Every structure is written in structure tokens, then in C-alpha cells.
Image (cartoon, rainbow, N blue to C red):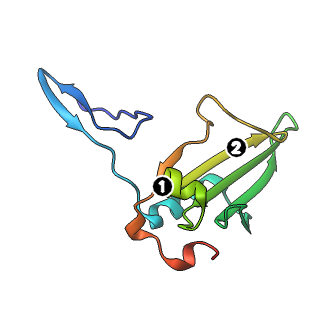
């Protein structure tokens, strides 16, 4: 059986392939992949702003069928001068807010996806 499995963790772990244990490790995505995921998350007509940590942030706001304001935020926490990035490493946040409240559970929960530092260029963040 071949399938797709997603695990919300970054440390290596084992899965069974039949009776054979296989080591699985997650790889950080590239900055280019982070941009692609960000664009897919926010959709068309997004604005680009500077985040509080000096990162680049894409944002869009739409209204759903129930009249809720849905804000999609893609934040690139990649500025090496940011204490947040120094502590957690460079990563992509894909946040969804509904009526100003961040979704904290379920499929719209904000994943923090690690970004490979070697793929980050100086123009990918504000100094």
C-alpha cells in the first residue's frame, strides 16, 4: 500500500513499511517553496507588508458565505537579526484569522514550516 502521511513534527521517527521499520526525517523547504506556499495560501490580490520582526508578510482579506471576515497571512520569519528567528530558526507561518481571531486548531491551524537557511537571500527580508 502506498499512501501519503503528514506528521506535525520535525524530529526523525520510524514508520513500518510492512514489517520493516523505515527512518523518516522531515527536510526544511526552500525559500522558493515557501513563497509558492505563501502565494497559494493568501490567493490573489494580497498586499505585501513588513512584519514586526522585519520579515515580509503577504495578507489578503475576503468574506465567506456566512459574512465572516477571513484574513490569510503568510509570514516569512527569516530575518537573521530577529530574536524570534534566532530562537526558532527561519520558518514560514500560514495564519488564518476569522473575524480577527487566529485559528488555533483544525486544518486551518498555522503551521510553522522550517525554511532551509542556505536558500534565504538578503532581499527576502527587511534589514
Q: Residue furthest right?
A: 67
- Residue in view at x 40 percent, y 61 percent: 116
Tell me which corner region of the image, top left, top right, bottom left or bottom right, holds residue 78: bottom right
Q: Secondary structure at mark 2?
A: strand
Q: Residue at x 52, y 52 (%)?
A: 87
Labels 1 and 2: the sequence-earlier one: 1
- Point out which mark residue 89 bears: 1
Q: Nearer the viewer, mark 1 or mark 2?
A: 1
Residue at the far top in the pictured view: 19
Image position, residue 79 (x, y; %): 57, 67
Report the side of 12 relative to 6 (left or right). Answer: left
The residue carrying mark 2 is 96
Circle number at residue 32: none
C-alpha separation, residue under disc 1 versus residue under disc 2: 22 Å
Q: Residues within 10 Å of mark 1 (few under 14, many from 20)?
A: some
Residue 49 at x, y = what percent?
A: 74, 67
52 horizontally vs 125: left or right: right
Residue 4, given in percent of the width and then of the height, sits at: 34, 35
Left or right, residue 21 beside residue 10: left
Residue at image location 57% in from the left, 68% down from the top: 81
Amino acid at each position: 500500500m502506498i499512501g501519503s502521511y503528514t506528521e506535525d513534527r520535525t524530529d526523525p521517527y520510524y514508520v513500518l513499511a510492512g514489517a520493516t521499520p523505515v527512518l523518516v526525517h522531515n527536510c526544511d523547504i526552500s525559500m522558493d517553496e515557501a513563497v509558492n506556499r505563501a502565494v497559494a495560501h493568501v490567493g490573489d490580490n494580497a498586499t505585501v507588508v513588513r512584519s514586526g520582526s522585519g520579515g515580509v508578510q503577504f495578507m489578503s482579506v475576503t468574506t465567506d458565505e456566512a459574512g465572516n471576515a477571513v484574513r490569510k497571512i503568510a509570514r516569512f520569519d527569516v530575518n537573521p537579526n530577529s530574536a524570534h528567528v534566532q530562537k526558532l530558526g527561519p520558518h514560514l507561518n500560514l495564519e488564518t484569522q476569522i473575524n480577527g481571531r487566529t485559528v488555533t486548531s483544525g486544518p486551518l491551524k498555522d503551521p510553522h514550516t522550517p525554511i532551509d537557511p542556505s536558500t534565504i537571500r538578503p532581499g527576502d527580508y527587511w534589514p
